[in-house]
Image: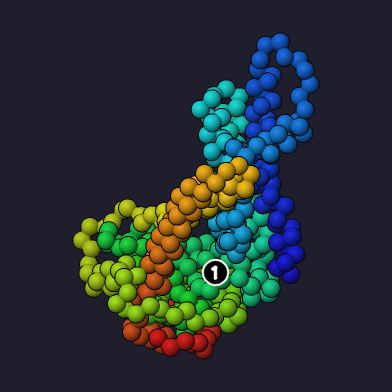
Amino acid sequence: MTFLRYLVALPLIVLSYAGVPFAYLTMSSYLFRTSLPGRKDEFDFVAEFMKHLTDLNGFWPVPVAFLLFAGLWWMTVAWPRIALLPTVPVALVGVLTGGQRSLLALAAPAVAWGLAWIAAKVVSWPVTGDVRRSAVEVAIGLRGGGRLRVQSRRLLLDKLPPPRHAESPVGRVAIPFDRISHVEAGAVRTAAQWRFGNTSELTISPGPVLRVIGGGQEWLLPVDDIDKATRLVVERSKARAKPDPRPALESTRWSNAKKLWDLQGKQSMTPNLKKVKHGTHHTMLVLSVLTAAMAGYAVFRIFTDSWGFLIGVLFFGGVSYGTARAWASMGATQKLAEENPRPPMAEDPDPRHSPVTTWSCQPVILGQTSDL
């Protein structure tokens, strides 16, 4: 069961997000103590660890990481990156200090990242029936680059080559499960180039290929374990498809998507080598959580100290609310562009047509669950 997987993964997450940074601070204190001349007293590791654990000045990044984990419990790809939030700030001080602590500081983020990565693998692999029907994200690498992320409500394709057009606002594409109309496992006998809706081009090497059609898009994905990938996509699509209403075309949230629509018929004379940066708007989410924690602390001080902390509540609360709204707005704009590189009124490609000349297929048809 997926629940049991989370029970196994949770201790690894606790070690990654809290154990590693506080263990690093404890070992850093030990190395500093032993470097002092004439210090021969015994070092109490447990007492030192508990001291750092209860020190709020070094503790704030840890609850922020756990809050992000609680909000992204299904997005396993994000777990290792969240692990860097508590560890990197304290490790950076050790790197700047130099000496033995610098080596320890370099190792701490790697250990935290590795533990969170193992926790993500515990939850998502092997891909059994309960995983296929759950919301847990499963990442599948593609031959020649790129990654398919089977998420809670959609398929997301990232780590693609840079878009051919430098004006492309997104470097990823996605298809919600409720808009998938056709899935089939097939193969190509010779290498071919395939262009996605964001103008990225992927080299399809000979071998098994997963074909997905929906939302006006057509994907050819070179996947080695084609049977497992096909079964995952089909079962997750049937179990997790849910209509997601889109805003009116007059909404400003379509701005990035409309840029892509204008690029579809254009040819790029000089290939673009610069990748599109993703996830920068998530810094606003981190800032929102941090300032919300500060606002909560100010509320606590109102009851324990004075009403003067009301200024802190209003200031940090306002910043938290504003950054949260900005994060949600930017995320919605990007999501619309990823899922709609073609206009919503565009028809799906005809699955009866061969996408490339050496294509052969074994079709698996899905009933479409939402109108376009």
User: Residue 259: where, in percent of width, then height?
Assistant: 27, 68
Residue 281: quadrant of the picture: bottom left
Is residue 10 at all visible to an observer of this figure? yes
Where is the N terminus found, in terms of image quarters? bottom right
* Residue type at the position of mark 1: Gln
Residue lying furthest front: 307
Task: Identify residue for label 1.
Answer: 151
Considering depth in this image, is 158 or 55 the residue closer to the camera? 55
Give the vertical position of 94 relative to 134 (above or below).
above
Where is the C terminus found, in terms of image quarters? bottom left
User: Residue 223: where, in percent of width, then height?
Assistant: 52, 68
Residue lying furthest top: 38
Residue at (59, 37) in percent of width and height: 57
Is residue 338 at all visible to an observer of this figure? no
Q: Is residue 160 left or right of residue 27?
A: left
User: Residue 54: where, in percent of width, then height?
Assistant: 69, 39
Give the vertical position of 352 relative to 186 (above or below).
below
Q: Is residue 261 left or right of residue 99?
A: left
Q: Secondary structure at mark 1?
A: loop
Give the vertical position of 160 relative to 266 (above or below).
above
Instruction: Estimate how packed mark 1 is, as few (under 14), some (14 to 19) or many (20 or more) residues with alpha carbons within 10 Å.
Output: many
Residue at (60, 27) in percent of width and height: 101
Considering depth in this image, is 194 or 35 the residue closer to the camera? 35
Q: Is residue 49 left or right of residue 294?
A: right
